[in-house]
Amino acid sequence: MKDIILMTPGPTMVPEEVRKVTGMQPLHHRTPDFYALFSRLNNNLKQIFKTKNEVITLTSSGTGGMEAVVANIFSTGDKVLVASIGYFGERFYDIAKAYGLDAELLDFGWGNAVDLNVLEDKLGNGNYKALLVTHNETSTGVTNNVKEIAKIANRYGVVVIVDAVSSLGGIPLEMDEWGIDAVITCSQKCLMAPPGLAFVSLSERAWQMAKTSNLPKYYFNLKKAKEGVLKSNPDTPATPAVSTIMAVSKSTEMLLNTGLEEVYKRQVLYGSKVRNYIKDLGLELLPREEIASNLITAIKVPEKYKASDIINYMKENYKVLITGGQGLLKGKIIRIGHMGYLTDEMLDKTLTALKEAVDTLK
Amino acid sequence: MKDIILMTPGPTMVPEEVRKVTGMQPLHHRTPDFYALFSRLNNNLKQIFKTKNEVITLTSSGTGGMEAVVANIFSTGDKVLVASIGYFGERFYDIAKAYGLDAELLDFGWGNAVDLNVLEDKLGNGNYKALLVTHNETSTGVTNNVKEIAKIANRYGVVVIVDAVSSLGGIPLEMDEWGIDAVITCSQKCLMAPPGLAFVSLSERAWQMAKTSNLPKYYFNLKKAKEGVLKSNPDTPATPAVSTIMAVSKSTEMLLNTGLEEVYKRQVLYGSKVRNYIKDLGLELLPREEIASNLITAIKVPEKYKASDIINYMKENYKVLITGGQGLLKGKIIRIGHMGYLTDEMLDKTLTALKEAVDTLK
């Protein structure tokens, strides 16, 4: 289906300039042209991560990046707390369990944010090595207050690992300033490129932990990848997804040209515009307004509708693709992604399509 | 550097039709359009792997596919033999060691092929669960006789795992017919697409082993990936590299339209053409002619030359990129890749460039 507008939590729309670069002949990854491109990308990423640490590029989805962090900094039996508010929090827990960590799931419920008091109580009384937390939970349209979460964790000397897969480059996240030890993101959400790459950055403290980590890794060996990044001619241990690196190099350049502060501002406007429209339609948001994400909006589907009918109506009549719920929320919510490359026209068309779907299907 | 011709062991040249598809807006991976595309790709891959088993698509480089096979079918301490003939054989050994297997390296030397008698002796007298072997060793330009290797392994009930990263779709490999238990390949070599995807297929016997495997995996969980492939609307556990899936779907269709037998025939012609030209120039192949690869040719650099001078001359004067040696062979050989998308013009230009480099630099 051509010309469809993706208003999803990724893949998102890829600007034409970025698609053009993606469709070029891939560079060979051991050539000066690639080294120059990769240097620029690494530089762009450090600015977006707001870190002095190196950012590692992995050829994988965001999930691979989450696994890479777990496999590289922990050892068997390490006690970690996973503060979950939905599907991707649970995924982080599953990864930790798969690697034999002593992981505990602290479930705040789908549609809620991390309760800072509950978290503080837990971290103060446990003996956790690390806290794993999702910044922006796309399954529920909730954004956690990662700045405060990191502050609490640091108060108790607990390492902070943030899944910023759907948030980085869209809403504020300051890795160094906020004291975060690992940040993970990917190419196809706020970074406006096709899927296929994960990006990971570790703090000095996390790199120290990596030295004694006993978990198996080869493809996701971050120490080896970091050596590649630090070369005067930076490269990757194995052949990377060169076309996607070319794409993200372009898209991050565009993002930085716009300016992160400007992007953050726009996302606040998009978020409140969508929420106000939803309320005017008489629909209800899944989360409370104060914790609602400015990147994706989750809307309760009233009893009289079927979620799939609304989604199909919008797709067939307006060529706008939104998504339904995942896991527990399947059939119960619809979700409008408004992250990454987005124009007012795209957003207005989406809201009009939703209104018509709701009016027609009732 | 634009318009450069990649005569490398990957990334290789991507045909314009494939690049066009790569540069399109990525489909969302939970839509009927994607399911249809992914079904076609899976079907194409089964034909290319020559297997009735499912082929799993992983968003990673070929190395990730190798690791996925190791992590999914083995358990800690499993005794395996790695028959190595170069850089990528050693990589397979490193992966096995990283995952705590009782791995033994049987090194046949860089530039040699697996000696079938030595192998038979070893497999007959060891108690190996599996044999890990490279089909086409790009670091040395040698192709192993995998058909005979698999026959020997099967005689002793040893599971056969073949790294076909640089061979599948270019030279004959019959997974089912030859009794191979795991085959790994990737998107950017004989399959004529950009890098970013690995493809893996397991035999029934390998899937049985996967049931008891105790090694950690999450992102590379092949059982979960297989469930996705077997759905009536096939998908992947995490967001895949959709643009690259779109590309490989197109490129494998082109490959099958040409016909595998026709491609194999062409590769034999390309291989002998390059080797004859090399000999006419008075240069020496690294391997013996009988084991020389039809996908990549490794040439010894005579004392009076510097490998990098030849490579740079060809790049600067002809915009043709060949590569040097890896590991042990750094500076000692040059390598001409002639796999994947290749025209007579590209090959002739490469050979002319090499001749001129050799004449000029002597």
Image: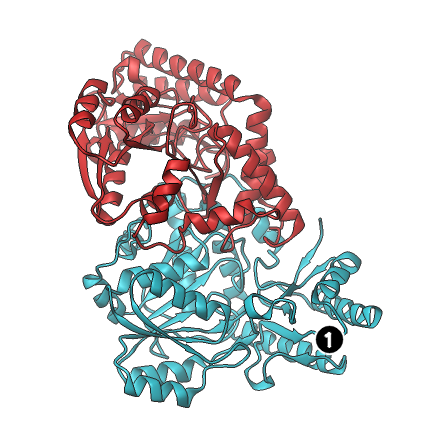
Chain colours: A cyan, B red
> With respect to residue A150, does B209 lie above or below?
above
Location of mark 1 (residue): A303
Q: Is residue A181 left or right of residue A326?
A: left
Q: Is residue A325 left or right of residue B196?
A: right
Q: Is residue A270 left or right of residue B287?
A: right
Q: Is residue A262 left or right of residue A67?
A: right
Q: Horizontal and vertical percent for residue B234?
A: 58, 47
In the rendered image, is residue A151 in sight?
yes
Furthest residue to the left?
A: B125
The quarter of the displayed image where residue A352 is located? bottom right
Give the image location of residue A357, x and y in percent.
Answer: 79, 68
* Whole-percent x, y for residue A260 in the image: 51, 71
Write the residue at 25% across / 71% down: A205
For residue A95, which quarter of the picture? Answer: bottom left
User: Residue at image x 31%, y 30%?
Assistant: B134
Quarter of the picture containing the C terminus of chain B is: top left
The answer to whether residue B15 of the structure is visible from this angle is: no
Q: Up-down: is B300 above or below A62?
A: above
Q: Position of residue A322 (x, y in %)?
A: 67, 63
Point out the image quarter for the N terminus of chain B. top left
Q: Chain of mark 1?
A: A
The secondary element bearing badge 1 is classed as loop
- B335 or B123: nearer the eye? B123
The residue carrying pointer 1 sits among few (fewer than 14), some (14 to 19) or many (20 or more) residues within 10 Å by Cα, namely few
The residue sitting at 16% across, 31% down in the picture is B126
Of B340 and B66, the residue lying toward us: B66
**Amino acid type of the residue tagged 1 in the rendering:** Glu
Of residue A165 and residue B104, the one placed in the foreground of this image is: B104
Q: Residue at x 57, y 74 (%)?
A: A141
Is B242 situated above or below B1?
A: below
